[in-house]
Image (cartoon, helix red, strand yellow):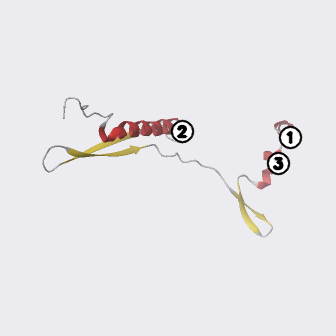
Amino acid sequence: MDTNAAPILSLYNVCRGAADEIFRREVNLVIDNIVDVNTDSEQKRSIVMEFEFIPMKDRSGAAVSLKVKSKLAGVEPVEGTMFLTRRGDELVAVPYDPRQEELFTMEPQQQEKKR
């Protein structure tokens, strides 16, 4: 066996090429998280790739395992309101004050005329 013909271990071939594939996938998740307007634009994101090498008893090589952890920015809190109203016998929540419903159903021109 010609050991000089075997490729030298690298990030592109370790774990049968999975490191590169997993890294590219995680980078895409980071990119998606960065452009998501619902996340903190200034929070740091990270990808940690940990390789473990478990030597063989005869020291002729090692088993290699890869663990990947990504830390993305969480979704920013969003605030809103809800109002309670009765519909028949049922109490329901609605997104705006039903006593001001005309503000949400009128055309903008009508709202200007009312002022």
Q: Residue at x 42, y 36 (%)?
A: 24
Mark 3 neighbour density, 10 Å: few (under 14) some (14–19) many (20 or more): few
Which residue type does callout 2 highlight?
Asp
Q: Which residue is mark 2?
A: 36
Q: Which residue is mark 3?
A: 102
Mark 2 neighbour density, 10 Å: few (under 14) some (14–19) many (20 or more): few
Specify the quadrant that holds the C terminus: top right
Judged from this view, the residue extending furthest toward the bottom is 89
Q: Residue at x 23, y 29 (%)?
A: 5
Which residue type does callout 1 highlight?
Lys
Mark 1, secondary structure of its residue: helix
Which residue type does callout 3 highlight?
Glu
In this rendered view, identify the residue nearer to me: 78 or 28.
Answer: 28
Looking at the rendered image, the disc whose residue lies closer to the viewer, 1 or 3, is 3
- The Cα atoms of the two marked residues, 3 and 2, are separated by 34 Å
Mark 2, secondary structure of its residue: loop
Q: Residue at x 48, y 46 (%)?
A: 74
Q: Residue at x 47, y 40 (%)?
A: 29
Q: Quadrant of residue 98?
A: bottom right
Mark 3, secondary structure of its residue: helix
- The Cα atoms of the two marked residues, 1 and 3, are separated by 11 Å
Q: Which residue is mark 1?
A: 114
Q: Position of residue 101 (x, y in %)?
A: 80, 51
> Which mark is first along the chain, 1 or 2?
2
Q: Quadrant of residue 60?
A: top left
Mark 1 neighbour density, 10 Å: few (under 14) some (14–19) many (20 or more): few
Tell me if I can see residue 43 in this picture. no
Do labels 1 and 3 touch, CB within 8 Å? no
Q: Is residue 91 left or right of residue 64?
A: right
Judged from this view, the residue extending furthest toward the top is 4
